[in-house]
Structure formats: structure tokens, C-alpha cells
Image (cartoon, rainbow, N blue to C red):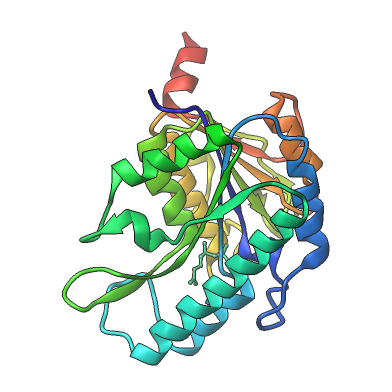
Amino acid sequence: MLQDVILIKLGGSVVTHKERAMTMNKMAIDRIFKTFLSVKVPIIVVHGGGSFGHYWSVKYDMHSKPDRYPSDGIAIVHESMILLNHKLVKSMMKFRLNPYSVSPFSFISNNKPIAKKIVELASMTRDKIIPVTYGDIVYRTNHKYSILSGDELMTMLSYVLKPKKVVFAVNVDGIYRDPRTKDLINTVEEKSQIKFSSVNFDVTGGMKRKVREALKISLSGIDVHFINGFKPDRLLKILDNKITKGTVIKGKRSSKRNAR
Ligand code: IPE
């Protein structure tokens, strides 16, 4: 039987200082992992690239479109993500969270997710392990590579694992109707409620992509939450089914059920 899990994405803009190359946000990280100690449900963590992977992928002009990118670029993006992942895993160790780092390379082959391996990640959570994976540059097919974002990974893992909840921890309070006025959308029942032209935009175009992936996940019936990663107590509230500041994109099936 598939183990119930919660899938959490730690945005690169939360775990790193986006404007400073290869710099972790130690305070934010410690706060998040300290909060994880109070989480009593099985979780799987995905993290983004922030000023590690993104910094180099921009320098080498590497994208999500499969292409024959320069080998030194591939190596450096990958190495920077391993470094960030290692730093995060080390801080989790400090809090005795039992992290287990997993490269996305190990569950993707021939451009497709290996469901059997992904299910094993969920099984591991029963042993008080927290699997931690990350966006990376990955081999596709025919000597082409592409950036697989942590956001796309969230969709890939969600399709296989059907998590109870999916949470994106980002550097703002949630999805804004208009980023200029910071008018927060609390609940999204219909895709049309989100105007893509005004979705808060960050340098890497990150927020738009997160919302796009979140909408895909919600179509498989799963509620997707956006919360401020700098206020990790909000994560606990979500896991406790309590109301907190943030945006929830209601799972399509569950919203139908509610309407009945
Ligand atoms: C980035 O993953 C992966 C690389 C650039 C190698 P994400 O695109 O999910 O990262 P953030 O969360 O937006 O920084």
C-alpha cells in the first residue's frame, strides 16, 4: 500500500540568498528545520536552486528545454546543487531529522519517472527518514540535457505518490491577485481566478512556474498550499488543518466533493 505523505518544496529563494551567489540563508533554514521537529506526519522534501543552481544555469544559459548544453555548464550546475543539498542535509542532521539525500537522476530514466523508485521514497518515511531531493540538470535523451526544476519534480512525485497535501514554501505570503498591492488570494477554486499576467514574478520567473505546476497537481485532487517559508509555523498550521495566512489551490476532486 502507498504510504501517506506530505510533499514539501523549499523554494530556492527561501533557503538561499537569491541576490548573493552560492550563499545559504542559514537563519531561514534553521527555523524551518527546527519546525520540522514538530511535524508528526511523514514528509518528503524537494528543494530548489536559488543562488546555487540558478546562478550557474543563468550564466551558462541553460533552460528546461532539452538541448546539447556545454559539458562544463552541466557539471557546474550539478555540482552546485549537490553542494546546496549537502549543506541542507547537514543542517537537518544537526536537528536529528534523519534526512536521506536522493538525486533526481536515480528516479528518472529515458525522460520518464521511475514510479517504483519514487514509491520507495514514500516507504522510507515509515523508517523515520526524510527523503530530500532537488531540482537539477538532468540527462534526457540523445545527449540532450535540461534543467528539471524542483517545481516540476513536485508534479512528478505527486502523480506517483498522491500526497495528502502539497506545500510550496516561498519567499512571499502566497499568490497575490496583484503583487503591487500584495492582495493575497486565500483560496483558489478555479484556475481562472489566477491572472498569469500579474502573478508575482521573481528573477527566474519562478513564481509563475510554481503556480503552473501547482495547478497541475491540484487537478489530481490534491490541495496545494503556498506559504511563506520565512514563517514556518504556518506550515504546522496547515498540517494540523488549521487556518493560516497563505493560498490554497483546492484539489479539483475535493472542491467538487465540497460543492455537492
Ligand atoms: C532549480 O530548481 C534547479 C536548477 C536551476 C538546477 P527550482 O527552479 O525549483 O529552484 P527555485 O526554487 O525556483 O530556486
Q: Classify 52 as above or below 37.
A: below
Name which quarter of the figure residue 129 lies in.
top right
Horizontal relation, residue 44 to residue 38: left or right = left
Q: Residue at x 24, y 77 (%)?
A: 144
Residue 50: image location, x then y, percent? 61, 70
Along the viewing direction, whichever of 256 and 12 lies nearer the viewer = 12
Along the viewing direction, whichever of 216 and 197 lies nearer the viewer = 216
Residue 86: image location, x then y, percent? 61, 67
Q: Residue at x 44, y 18 (%)?
A: 256
Q: Classify 93 as above or below 82.
A: above
Along the viewing direction, whichever of 131 and 219 lies nearer the viewer = 131
Residue 148: tell me if it is visible: yes
Residue 203: tell me if it is visible: no
Residue 87: image location, x then y, percent? 67, 68
Horizontal relation, residue 252 to residue 143: left or right = right
Q: Classify 97 as above or below 196.
A: above
In the picture as drawn, the residue positioned furthest to the top comes out as 260
